Amino acid sequence: MGDLRKVDKNAAAEDNEMMRNAYGAFSISMMSQSTTLMLYLEKNKICTNPTYQRYSDIWSINKKQLLIDSILNGFDIPKLYFIESPTDENCKRNRYAVIDGKQRLEAIWGFMSGNFPLADDFLYREDPDVEARGLSYNELAQKYPRLKAKFDGHALSVVVIKTDDMEVVEEMFSRLNEGEPLSASEKRNAMGGPIPPLVRELAKHKYFKSTVPFMDRRGRYWEVATKYLFFEERGGIADTKREYLDKFVQRWKDRERKRREEAQSSAWRLYESSNAVLDKLYDIFGEGDPLLRSVGMAILYYLLVREAGAREGVIARERLVGFESKRKRNRQVAKKDVAEADWALLEFDRLSQSLNDASALKFRLEVISRHVLGEGIETKIADPVKEPDALWAGGDQE
């Protein structure tokens, strides 16, 4: 078996120079032995889940089958990008980490592992008489060994990059995937700076792992955790539209470049404050708690506990259940006669779709706090873009 690290260093000399000019010191080359079979046999040396990557199993079965179809029929497959000797926290024990091409690799490996067969409408263009529809990888080997050998021997174009600068890798991942359907949280995760690692760490809290019932897909926990940290930076309620969260992550990345230790220390304080709120939330809610089934309520409960401060002792789960019951009864009343229903509770329900709007969050917080705490929490809306120093110094808020 050949060594995956054997690369053709002359094949990419021109690209090397271009990349050095763009990013500084690192090398780029083409992997010489990169057939589908070779990559499958060496897959334990390839890390597919570095911290900047998206989640696995994003592709549908149809898209995976289409990729296998393309390989068997000789269509061009886009390049894959690996980093050699990765320093990423998830991949230090691996020889390579995937920068771009994770979904393609996992689709190929899934087919070879027997996780899915060829599509029912598969057609081998070189010989339409080949009846390979619906065959698994092992069945293909038995019925059409030459076709299986063609698949095994297909050479994938793999670009190998060597650098110790993880910010370069994260930047490259973001750029390579600019045309791909990355979620906003996945893009922010690849931006670098002190915030993404803290988001990932916060998303590991037992509150997310045990009490939140909604699924963690496409960086959903990352998205919620980013909003929690953003509230800590803003000192309370603020608009959480995508542009503001992007600016939040970028702002701390810029701060880290100027004052690394100070920025990391300040960002860590945001994490500690948010983590303390999650500890309280974990104590309130049960495992897979249905009260947390929506992201909107998970955001609102966070603000309720955060803003309640010393009064959090009265936030018992029973009070929250009681509030949900009031909302349900109020909706039933409104169906019969809307004029008899509690307008504030109806408005609370209507604004549940305005997840990122600060005014909606403010109104809903005041409503739920009146029912749960006996008094409405009145809080200001923070400027979503003002520099943190000015914000914390008591700058104007509206």
Image (cartoon, helix red, strand yellow):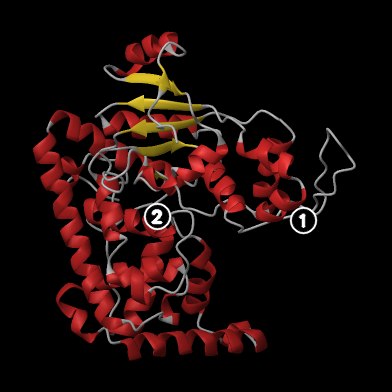
Report the residue marked by disc 2.
223
Residue 394 in sight from this viewpoint: no
Residue 307 falls in image quadrant: bottom left
In this rendering, would 149 be left or right of 82? Answer: right
Dot 1 alpha-carbon crowd within 10 angstroms: few under 14, some 14 to 19, many 20 or more: some
Query: Which circle, 2 or 1, is nearer the viewer?
Result: 1
Report the residue marked by disc 1.
134
In this rendering, would 384 be left or right of 390? Answer: right
Look at 85% across and 44% down and name the residue there.
130
2 and 1 marks in contact (CB < 8 Å): no
Vertical arrangement, residue 213 with respect to residue 65, above or below: below
> The residue tagged with tag 1: helix, strand or loop?
loop
Residue 83 x %, y %: 36, 32
124 or 24: which is nearer to us? 124
Q: Which mark is residue 206?
A: none
Residue 362 falls in image quadrant: bottom left
Dot 2 alpha-carbon crowd within 10 angstroms: few under 14, some 14 to 19, many 20 or more: many
Residue 48 x %, y %: 42, 46
Residue farthest along the right direction in this orientation: 129
